[in-house]
Amino acid sequence: MVVFLLRRPGYIDMSIRSYSAMQPLPISVVGAGYWGRKVIREILSLAQTTRRVSLHSVVDNSPSTLEQCRKEFGSLKYRLNYGDLLSDSEASAVHICSPNPTHFEVASELLRSRKDVLVEKPLALRAREAYELVRLAETNRRVLSTGHVHRFNNGVTELKRVVDSGVLGDIYYLRLNWTGFLPPQKDRDVITDLGPHPFDICNNVLGEWPTKITCKGKGYRTRTSDEVAFITAEYLDGVVANIELSWLDRERRREVTVVGSDAVARLDCLDQRLVLRRSDSSDPVSVVQSNTLGDEILHFAECVEHNGGSEGYTNLADGWLGAGVVRLLETSKRSLCEERTVQVQPLESVEIFAGEQTQKGFRKLAT
């Protein structure tokens, strides 16, 4: 057994190369499913409007998916195997949009090949795998970012400002609804798919991680995976966050409510609309809507640029954040399985077992 004591740095570790602000960062996209194509569109748009990034290549091991991309995006560099990127010196940064079970395998190989990586949430399926990616990034002095896109949601930023200002009074609890309708899913569960963003928003708004988690869930149309989950996260100061995750609700909601002693703040994360409600009034809070995905990609490019500079630069969605959220997902599943409240393992020390079996098997990338 090898034990690594991981300490979160205050900024990105300085490294070897830097990209000039005048030179676009070439980004390859691995996984051209629904979300992967959104990322491709965004990079192509940013390439025209900002010239800070460029699309190096698109990778998916489904020929039919790549053919769809050719019809939509035209002549680009298409590849069937992400392994082709490992020895390509021009493929310096990669945005991983492949299915969740492949994240660890793909990201670890790319980091070992000294590529800067942005991994869509969740960073991995297991906390130990996620922290291993953090270790690989630090060892190879590469940027590791996680696709916690609401770190770049101006509505969430303004909600945090409102909470920190004290206008709500004493914070009692949070309520988060992350719902929508999907047909029965194979090899997917609602906690892994929908849980990362609510947990991250809670941690961002409150500025702390929960200490206890209680989770109840059920699969109504299938016995192979949970389709709805109700999670209660408890924090040291007595604040509680209640999270509803559902693939059964016909209404698509991405909502956050913070209840305080003096007022209630309600945020619709989709349209970034924030309302402050008191006993005698309901007032909208001004929010300038942000392009969350575009801002996330540009922030990743800035992290890569500063990773070779002389000054530190804060990665707002770094691997530590992603790994911490995976830890909460893992704790939620344990609570569900054991039918009890579970203490969240502290961050200070993480055991990574050398040679331990990890999630393997690079499956079809299209989702």
Image: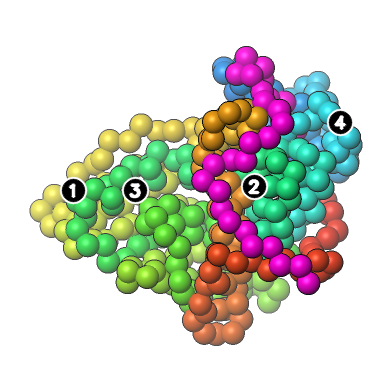
**How would you rate the neighbour count of disc 4 (Cα within 10 Å): few for under 14, some for 14-19, many for 20 or more?**
few
Query: Helix, strand, or loop for circle 2?
Result: strand
- Dividing the image into 4 quarters, which one contains the N terminus? bottom right
Q: Position of residue 321 (x, y in %)?
A: 55, 53
The secondary element bearing badge 3 is classed as: helix
Q: Mark 3 and mark 4 in contact (Cβ < 8 Å)?
A: no
**14 with respect to 237 (left or right):** right
Q: CA distance from mark 4 to mark 2?
A: 22 Å
Report if residue 16 lies within the magenta region. yes
First-in-chain label (4 vs 2):
4
Circle 2 crowding by C-alpha within 10 Å: few under 14, some 14–19, many from 20: many
Q: Which residue is mark 4?
A: 88
**Residue 362 in picture, x, y percent from top left:** 84, 54
Residue 278 rendering spot, x and y as whole percentages: 16, 54
Residue position for label 3: 160
Q: CA distance from mark 1 to mark 2?
A: 36 Å
Describe the element under mark 1 as helix, strand or loop. Answer: strand
